[in-house]
Image: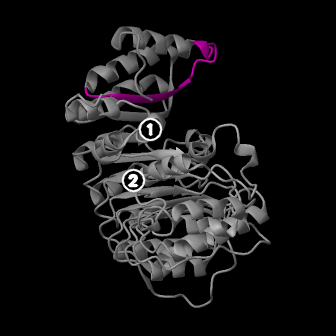
Amino acid sequence: MNSLPPEIQIAVFERLYKKDLVSSALVCRAWRQVAWDHVRWQSCTIRLTGLLQVLFGENSLESLDESDIKPSTSDSHRFLGLAAKVTSIRMDKSLANSLARVLLEITSSAPAKILFPALSTLDCGGRPQDDLVYTLFTGSSIKRIFISGGESGETASDSRRLLSSLLATQSQVQFVAADEMTSPGHGSPEFWRLPELVSFEYKGHFSPDNWAETIQNCPKLDSVTLEGTALGSNPPNLPSLSAPTLRRLNMEAFKSLELTIWVLESTNMPRLTTLDLELRHRMRQDASEHPGAPRARSAFGLLAERSQSLESLTLDTSIRLGVEILGAFRSLRKLEIVDRTPGCQLDDGDVESLCRSLPSLRRFHLEYNVFRYVCEGDAKITPRSLGYFARHCSDLKYLGLPVTATDPGDFVGPILAELVPFRGTLEHLVLTPITLLANRAKDFASFLLIQCPKLTGLDIYLDIADSWNSVCSLDVIEQEMRDTYFNGQQRSR
C-alpha cells in the first residue's frame, strides 16, 4: 500500500466505509495522514450509538451508564478521530452524566479540547439528557439544531433545559426546529437571543409574547414556520413589531385564528414573499359570519399595504376576504385558496376582477371544501372564466378552477373554446367537479389533451350525470386515455 502513488492511496481510502476508514487511520502514521488529512470528508452523519460503538464496542452499549467504564487508549484515539470528522450527529440515546464525564475526559486530549470541531448539525431527538450533555459541544460551531420535546411533560421540560443550555453557548445557530416543546400545564417554552438565527420552525403552544421576543431578538430571521395552538390571550395593546428580513411565514397548520390575525396586525414584514395561512374557525350552526371576520379583512388590507413584494399566498379559510382584498396583492405569482365559507362562492365577475388585478399570476388554484355548495343552484364559475385567465394572466402555467355548468350536455365545447389561448403555455390543469354525460367524458378528455399539448399534469374530477352508469366506467375512461395518449403511463396527478 505504501508503494502506491499518493493519488491511488487516496482513491482507495475514499472507497472505504467511514467506520473502516477510522480503523485504517490507526494502523500507522502514514495511513493516518492519508485518512485524516487527504481524504475528502465532505460530510459525516452518525448516530450517537454508532459513535459510542467505536469507543466501547458493539456489545457493551447496555452498560454505558456505569461510571467505571474506561476505554482503551487506541479506542479513545479512534473515537477522537471520528468525532473530529463528524458534521451531523443524532442523539438517539439518553446520555447520563456519568458517561458524559468519560467523554469529557477523553476530550481533554483532543486538539483545542474540542470534541466535535466540524459539527454543524445536531439532532437532539426526544430523549431526556442529563445536564452535562451540552458541554460535549462546547467549541463546536453548530448551525442547525433539531429537538423534540417527546410525549410527556417531564421529557418536554428536559428538552427545553437542554436546548436553553446549548443555545447559551451557541450564538451562531442559524436554524432551530423545536417539536412539541410544551403542553398545557407544563409551562411555556423559553426563547432565546440568537442574532444569527435565519430559520425557525416550532411545533407546540405559542404565545404572543413568544412571537414578539422572537422577532425582536433575531434580526436576521428569514423564515418562520409555526404549527400548533395559541398559549394565553392576546395583549390588549397592539405592539409595533418590525421584521425587515422575514421573507417566508408559514402558519398553515397553526390552529388559532385570533393569534394569526394578531401577528398580521402587529408585524411589519416589508420583504415578505411567501405566506401560508389558516384562517379557520369552528363553524357556527346558524351559518352567520364569525365575529373576527371584519378584523381579519382589516389585517389583510394592512398586510397588502406593508408587504408589497408578496409573490405566493396560500389560504385555508372559512372567512370571506373578498376579491378586492386579494386583488390588492399586485405582485402575486401564486395564489391558492381552499374556501370553506358556505354560500360565498366566486362568480365569473369576481374571477375577471381578480385576473385584472393579478396579471403576474403563474399559478392559481381555487378549491371549495364542500362540493355541494358549488353544485347546488345556478352555476357560479362557468367556462367563461377560463378565458379571463387566458386574456389577463399570460404567464399562467397552472390553473385549478371549480367550473360548473347548468347543462351537462353542452359543456365540452365552451371549455375547449376558452382554452385555445392556453395552447402554448398551460402545463397543469385541474377542473373539479365536472358534470358530464358518460358518452362525452372520454371525448372531452381527449380533445382537452389535443387542445393543450404542453399539459404535463391533468386532474379532472368527473361527476357522471347518467344515473345508469357506474363508477367503474370512470376507470375504463382513464385506462383508455392512458393507453391512447400516454403509452399506458398515468400522467402526474
**Residue 467 painted magenta:** yes
Give the residues in magenta. 454-472
Image-based side of 206 in relation to 475, left or right: right
Q: Give the quarter of the figure containing the N terminus.
A: top left
Residue at 50% x, 75% y is 169
Mark 2–mark 1 CB contact (< 8 Å): no
**Residue 258 painted magenta:** no
Q: Which residue is mark 2?
A: 335
Frontmost residue, 182 versus 350 = 182
- The image position of residue 396, as x and y in percent, is 27, 44
Name, please, the residue furthest toward the bottom. Answer: 237
Q: Which residue is mark 1?
A: 18
Counting residues from the N terminus, which is met first, the one under dot 2 or under dot 1?
1
Frontmost residue, 433 versus 40 = 40
Image-based side of 69 in relation to 224, left or right: right
**How far separated are the C-alphas under marks 2 and 1?**
47 Å
Frontmost residue, 492 versus 23 = 23
